[in-house]
């Protein structure tokens, strides 16, 4: 958080600065775009935001900022249960630069007074979130893995706060899971990495109102637009790790980069993707973009095969919602085994070749 904190024995942190800006009803989601395409992390947050709004009995609002987006983004956002969508369309608003997006959000939030704002923990979200929260003197919790609604009792002040956003994330290097609340400041802001939440179209009723505010009322582009992006290049992903139905992941226990070749062979047979723990990535066994966990990607495959992975909390945070978890480990007491549905005790050199042979013989 970007305000002074005191950490209670309960693991809850509260800002010490005075109460201000409390009010508003809506849950807001900042929708990130690439051209005219809404990013998947934003649709995931819209799904979660709708659930939070329903629990709070308030509306879900969304805001999207770009150039040439009017008429192109509405149907990518409204079906996720949005009651009101603010579309800011103007020259110089894409590609993203810090100043105009910050000014638009800050001025919009001063008008709307939302109680919650969610953003993706992307390159853009990690730049924009702190700027907005600092301007509004509200707290910000980064890289949340869960978001819930709950109450908090400040026994020292004799106050009970209801309907707070529980911002849950690993802390102290992943050794604990901290729950952070912000009783006195609005909006309560949190960023969430792509893949942590699961997106789903909303089947209930919502207003689906769209507003097209005049950009000049919220930002002076003559001032905020002084920084211009000369070249904008997006490189396509080399793999589909987040969307793979089967993920074969290796840890430091694979022993070497050559050891990971077995996992690629197994993944090929299973039509899956290969991932790795941070220890394996740091050791150079696999590429960084395949890292799964707190500082990597989050996956939700139907089957997750963990090979030579000890199961530290940082890694578990990125794969614990997998459908079926299979652990291959020579240590029967490895932490990963406690969350695994099936445990194969043995060395990866012994077990993985047998899996490859079996699946090759029995695959159609």
Image (cartoon, grey):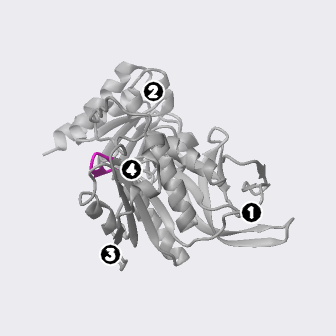
Q: Does the magenta stretch include residue 38?
A: yes
Q: Does the magenta stretch include residue 80?
A: no
Q: Distance between the residues labelled 4 and 2?
A: 28 Å
Q: Nearer the viewer, mark 3 or mark 4?
A: 4
The disc, 3 or 4, on the residue closer to the chain's N-terminal end is 4
Q: Is mark 2 on a helix, strand or loop?
A: helix
Residue 19's disc number? 1
At 30% from the left and 38% from the top, the residue drawn is 273
Residue 143's disc number? none
Where does residue 74 sit, x and y in percent of width and height? 29, 63
Residue 32's disc number? 4
Q: Can residue 192 be seen in this view?
A: no
Residue 203's disc number? 3
Q: How crowded is mark 4: few (under 14 residues within 10 Å), some or many (20 or more)?
A: many
- Circle 2 is placed at which residue position? 281
In the rendered image, the vertical position of residue 198 relative to residue 2, given as above or below: below
Q: Is mark 1 on a helix, strand or loop?
A: loop
Q: Distance between the residues labelled 1 and 4?
A: 30 Å
Q: How crowded is mark 3: few (under 14 residues within 10 Å), some or many (20 or more)?
A: few
Q: What stretch is highlighted in magenta?
A: 34-39
In the rendered image, the vertical position of residue 340 relative to residue 43, given as above or below: above
- List the single residue furthest toward the left: 364
At 45% from the left and 63% from the top, the residue drawn is 48
């Amino acid at each position: 958080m970007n305000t002074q904190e005191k950490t209670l024995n309960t693991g809850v942190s509260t800002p010490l600065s005075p109460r201000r800006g409390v009010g508003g009803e809506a849950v807001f989601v900042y929708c990130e775009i690439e051209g005219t395409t809404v990013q998947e992390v934003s649709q995931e947050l819209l799904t979660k935001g709708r659930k939070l709004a329903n629990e709070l009995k308030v509306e879900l609002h969304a805001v999207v900022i770009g150039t040439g987006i009017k008429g192109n983004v509405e149907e990518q956002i409204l079906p996720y249960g949005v009651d009101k969508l603010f579309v800011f369309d103007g020259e110089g608003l894409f590609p993203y630069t810090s100043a105009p997006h910050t000014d638009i959000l800050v001025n919009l939030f001063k008008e709307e007074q939302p109680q919650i704002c969610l953003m993706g923990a992307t390159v853009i979200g990690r730049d924009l979130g702190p700027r907005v929260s600092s301007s509004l003197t509200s707290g910000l919790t980064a890289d949340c893995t869960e978001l819930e609604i709950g109450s908090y009792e400040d026994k020292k002040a004799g106050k009970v706060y209801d309907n707070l956003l529980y911002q849950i994330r690993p802390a102290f290097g992943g050794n604990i899971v901290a729950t952070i609340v912000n009783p006195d400041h609005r909006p309560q802001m949190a960023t969430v990495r792509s893949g942590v939440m699961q997106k789903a179209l909303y089947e209930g009723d919502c207003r689906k109102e769209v507003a097209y505010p005049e950009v000049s009322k919220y930002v002076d582009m003559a001032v905020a637009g002084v920084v211009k992006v000369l070249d904008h290049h997006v490189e396509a992903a080399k793999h589909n790790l987040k969307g793979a139905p089967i993920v074969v992941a290796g840890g430091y226990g694979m022993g070497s980069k050559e050891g990971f070749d077995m996992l690629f062979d197994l993944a090929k047979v299973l039509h899956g993707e290969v991932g790795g723990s941070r220890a394996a990535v740091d050791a150079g066994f696999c590429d960084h973009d395949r890292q799964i966990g707190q500082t990597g990607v989050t996956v939700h495959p139907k089957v997750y095969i963990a090979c030579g992975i000890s199961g530290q909390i940082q890694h578990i945070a990125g794969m614990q919602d997998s459908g079926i978890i299979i652990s291959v480990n020579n240590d029967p007491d490895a932490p990963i085994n406690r969350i695994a549905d099936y445990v194969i005790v043995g060395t990866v050199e012994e077990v993985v070749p047998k899996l490859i042979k079996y699946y090759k013989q029995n695959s159609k």
